[in-house]
Image (cartoon, coloured by chain):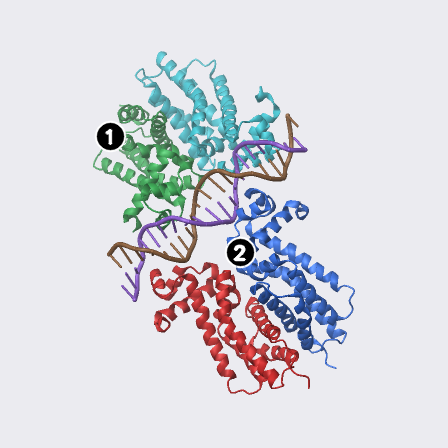
Chain colours: A green, B cyan, C blue, D red, E purple, F brown
Amino acid sequence: MRREKPKFKQIIDAAVVVIAEHGYHQAQVSKIAKQAGVADGTIYLYFKNKEDILISLFQEKMGSFIEKIEQEIEGISSPLEKLYVLVRTHFSALADDPHMAVVTQLELRQSNKELRQRINEVLKGYLRLIDSIIIEGMEKGEFRNDLDVRLTRQMIFGTIDETVTTWVMNEQKYDLAALAEPVYELLAKGCAAGR
Amino acid sequence: MRREKPKFKQIIDAAVVVIAEHGYHQAQVSKIAKQAGVADGTIYLYFKNKEDILISLFQEKMGSFIEKIEQEIEGISSPLEKLYVLVRTHFSALADDPHMAVVTQLELRQSNKELRQRINEVLKGYLRLIDSIIIEGMEKGEFRNDLDVRLTRQMIFGTIDETVTTWVMNEQKYDLAALAEPVYELLAKGCAAGR
Amino acid sequence: MRREKPKFKQIIDAAVVVIAEHGYHQAQVSKIAKQAGVADGTIYLYFKNKEDILISLFQEKMGSFIEKIEQEIEGISSPLEKLYVLVRTHFSALADDPHMAVVTQLELRQSNKELRQRINEVLKGYLRLIDSIIIEGMEKGEFRNDLDVRLTRQMIFGTIDETVTTWVMNEQKYDLAALAEPVYELLAKGCAAGR
Amino acid sequence: MRREKPKFKQIIDAAVVVIAEHGYHQAQVSKIAKQAGVADGTIYLYFKNKEDILISLFQEKMGSFIEKIEQEIEGISSPLEKLYVLVRTHFSALADDPHMAVVTQLELRQSNKELRQRINEVLKGYLRLIDSIIIEGMEKGEFRNDLDVRLTRQMIFGTIDETVTTWVMNEQKYDLAALAEPVYELLAKGCAAGR
DNA sequence: TATGAATGAGGGTTCATTCAT
DNA sequence: GATGAATGAACCCTCATTCAT
């Protein structure tokens, strides 16, 4: 399994740093190789081409991102609390990895349509996770039972994403993690069943 | 004022068509010139450089977009109704201009960080409009008075934007305008003062 | 018609010089551009890609080569004399253009199979010319009437080509034109009707 | 002597197969190694570099090719018959080894000038053999005594080579061996002393 | 001997921009 | 104002060769 090879991760981590520091369009393969401490050609022993680096980067990072959130949520029985933990974990994960935040919120969105569609495939896993919370919430009676799952998910994800993007564009000047609570409150108001 | 010259608009409209049909990275200056029916060099009599075309495009189109929404809202006294009209107008404007929808939701986001920051300058006008509705809503008691304006605006804009993007990525297969009502309901739940 | 543009010929002539002096594999586009006195990009206004330069080179040069031979032959009624003039013209044309001789006999043969097949298309015109002489020779009774046209053409072309190649590989040290007569004699013996 | 090591031949045979199937420019060292069932690095225990593989290939194969022809000719007293047997053996050897025919007639000619000059060194043995037949033919009175040895050899070799190349380029669709007789007749007409 | 992961030099092509007409 | 031919900088990827094991 190639993903266990240290160089695979080494190159991906280098790509995150280079993209965050120089921007997507200035992230030449040679720059990534240099940052990773390998020769240009070595990149191509682990990745099909440049695009493959970026797709793998997203899969790898987003994969562990989703895993982390799933682990945090696991064991929680209240869907509303799950929603809160999801927002909190999402925010704190990106607050803890400023490079990655820049890459996902700004730089990777400059990629071409094809790459972004591949990225969306990965994102779907996250969106399904949100969906499952919404559905469970309605079943357990914590969420209003007339919610449109897709629209609700778009509200939740859209709000989280916009909040992070604004934070990144403001150069991460304020404490993103601290926004988890109020953002959750706002979303919960939209979802929760009236008492 | 250059913006009144017919060729200025002619080139911008050509850019929208070319970007929508060929994608951002395939929208070469020569292709835009051809579509506009002018010589390559002529572009540079009206725009400083390629980026300037795109910034102008966004300013021009976003400007009239905001104007249209302001007009629709004007005269409405209820902030909640203003919010509804804003969502409805936003959705129907993009549903009526599929080219523009593709350009703003997908293609223009591939531009580099600098261009996107310029675009955000333009967007700020829209965000201020949303802010004013929120503030007015709290003042008039229609919205909860403990709302964080920035977060609430991020929820509103994030939800709208995510909804439109999902619709565009699904190739505009369903009726976006019909989503105005349920999306408004969702947002209103998050904002509105309890009974 | 692009072939009338001076730069088209200018670039082709530059390609001949560069290939002759540096060899096929060292004939970079930038080197050809420099020799032609144009920018690298200008090449691509006149040629689709590098291969197109080489194909055009061969078409252009081989075309006028065949034309020249056809003109020399025209008006001659004796097929045997036509054969002689063909050999003589072939030899003297290459003897007069040492760069071209190197290019056609050595360098262009290093091109890939696809390019060589395109070149062969052009060569067919020449082979057809030889065929027509053979057929006319048999009809007029100057050539033996039991000749296999294809084999005879292969003998004539193979002998001429091998003679020129040997001369080029010996660095054009001796007088190629002087070989026209004896080579003709040899070929004529193989073709001519005995009496 | 390295040539007796089994891997030496193994690699050369692999090279013939790979070049014949994939073409000269697609015959990477790693592909040859794989076909030979050895590691890339192992190649360099038996050959100085890639070019050395090809030179050795030609030496090895051409060597046994010439040997075979010499054996066939040995014991024949008539130079004309020797010429016939040479043509016949040349044709049938290549007809029996289609891979080798493609490699020698098409693929190896794409190699660079230096390699081709090394190949010509090897070829000289064959050309000397032809020369010896011509000289013997003149001495014994079977050939015209005014032949220029070099030109006659160029005719013989050029005709044979052109015939084989045409056959290969026509995808070996017809029976090459059957052409030995008529090609010999044609050459003999050019060489033989009049009755 | 044998391996195969790692190396790194080298080049065809695109396209935003200029400027002589 | 308008043209469009010319410019030239910039980059991804391949593959022959090496060398630590």
The residue furthest top is: B140
Query: Which numbered marker is on residue C24?
Result: 2
Mark 2 crowdedness (10 Å alpha carbons): few <14, some 14-19, many ≥20: many
Q: Give the vertical position of A49 relative to D142 (above or below).
A: above
Q: Is residue C98 left or right of residue A39?
A: right
Query: Which numbered marker is on residue B79?
Result: none
- Which residue shows up at 63% across the image and 75% down it? D148
Labelled pair 1, 2 in contact (Cβ < 8 Å): no
The residue furthest left is: A75
Q: As shown in the figure, which amino acid type bears the numbered disc 1?
A: Glu
- Which residue shows up at 61% across the image and 53% down it? C56
Total marks shown come to 2
The one nearer the camera, D4 or C45, is D4
Dot 2 falls on a residue whose secondary structure is helix
Is residue D16 visible in the rendered structure shown here? Answer: no
Image location (x, y in percent) of residue B81 = 42, 18
Q: Give the vertical position of D94 relative to B107 (above or below).
A: below
Residue hosting label 1 = A81
Image location (x, y in percent) of residue C92 = 67, 63
Dot 1 falls on a residue whose secondary structure is helix
Q: Give how far apart the Cα atoms at labels 1 and 2 are.
A: 71 Å
The one nearer the camera, A19 or B166, is A19
Q: As shown in the figure, which amino acid type bears the numbered disc 2?
A: Tyr
